[in-house]
Image (cartoon, rainbow, N blue to C red):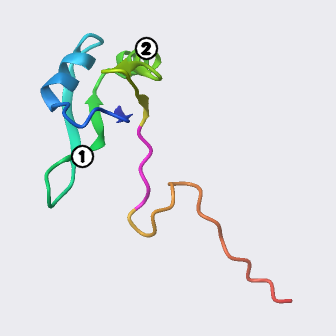
Amino acid sequence: MVIYVGNLPYDMEEDELIEMFEEYGAVRSAKIVRDQITNRSRGYAFVKMDDRAAAKRAIEDWDQGSIDDQIIKVQEAKFSNKMGNKPEGKSKKRSSKRI
């Protein structure tokens, strides 16, 4: 399962994020999203965990939790498709009916 973690402190590092989630189970990877030019954190990250139950426990425990006095958002990641930035399964079909 891929977990979205938002509103992170800008100085947080991936190893800290891994440590935070390893309490719940094995972490496959953690990636803090960074600005391409400045390399500064953009304040959010993605954590991959193979054990879905462990990932759900981590989400429940950390969502609306606090790191360095910042409330963080933790939820299952939702990715959009590559063809138009619309969430999978939520595309609208145009009507072929003419008025």
Which quarter shows the N terminus? top left
For the residue labelled by badge 2, is the local secondary structure a helix, a strand or a loop?
helix
Instruction: Check if residue 32 falls in the magenta segment.
Output: no
- Farthest right residue? 99
**Residue shown at the point (29%, 38%) measured from the top left:** 46
**Residue shown at the point (26%, 10%) measured from the top left:** 23
Mark earlier in primary sequence (2, 1) = 1
Which circle marks residue 61 in the picture?
A: 2
* Mark 2: amino acid: Asp
Number of marks in the image? 2
Which quarter shows the C terminus? bottom right
Residue 18 lies in quadrant: top left
Seen in the picture, residue 47 relative to 54 is either above or below; the reply is below
Seen in the picture, residue 83 relative to 27 is either above or below; the reply is below
Part of the protein shown in magenta: 77-81
Residue 70 lies in quadrant: top left
Residue 44 lies in quadrant: top left
Category of crowding for the residue at label 2, using alpha-carbon neighbours closer than 10 angstroms: few (below 14), some (14–19), many (at least 20): few
* Mark 1: amino acid: Val
- Specify whether 92 is left or right of 22: right
Q: Main secondary structure of the magenta part?
A: loop
Which circle marks residue 33 in the picture?
A: 1
For the residue labelled by badge 1, is the local secondary structure a helix, a strand or a loop?
strand
Which circle marks residue 74 in the picture?
A: none
Judging depth in this view, the residue of 85 and 73 nearest the camera is 73
